[in-house]
Amino acid sequence: MRLVEHLNKHPCEYIQLAEKTVCRNLSHMETFFQDVIDRGGEGIILRDSLCPLEPGRSRGYLKHKVCSPLEHFCVFTTLLTLIQQIEIQRCGSQSCK
């Protein structure tokens, strides 16, 4: 039994299926993405149609979403800390800046 048929017979409040949309080009994808964001969505999942379907995590999927300012801050802070650690390792001292 297909998942759609199963959910029609046995609805679940925690599962909502999303329709598949085939992007014709980059402009179409960005317009679709912006529509999702404007309706309160977090982003979209892109799938490489040439990759085989496989259980679990797949290399054929890519999450495309907008990062919040906090996420940008966390990434920036992590990168800054990493750069500082590399500089400390280069000169061998924590006073090195």
Image (cartoon, rainbow, N blue to C red):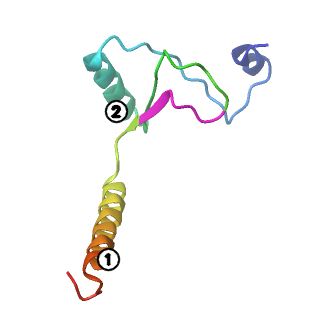
Q: Which residue is pictured at 55% across the width and 23% down the height?
A: 18
In the image, residue 83 sits, relative to residue 7, either above or below, namely below
Q: Is residue 4 left or right of residue 37?
A: right
Q: Position of residue 10 (x, y in %)?
A: 79, 23
Q: Is residue 96 left or right of residue 89?
A: left
Q: Which residue is pictured at 67% across the width and 29% down the height?
A: 55
- The front one of 82 and 4 is 82
Q: Position of residue 75 (x, y in %)?
A: 34, 58
Instruction: Name the mark on residue 38.
Output: 2
Instruction: Tell me if mark 2 has few (under 14), some (14-19) or many (20+) residues whose alpha carbon lies within 10 angstroms of its own.
Output: few
Q: Which residue is pictured at 31% across the width and 29% down the height?
A: 34
Closer to the eye: label 1 or 2: 1
Quarter of the picture containing the N terminus is: top right
Tell me the residue that label 1 is attached to: 89
- The front one of 43 and 95 is 95
Secondary structure of the residue carrying numbered label 1: helix
- Sequence-wise, the earlier of marks 1 and 2 is 2
Magenta part of the protein: which range?
56-63
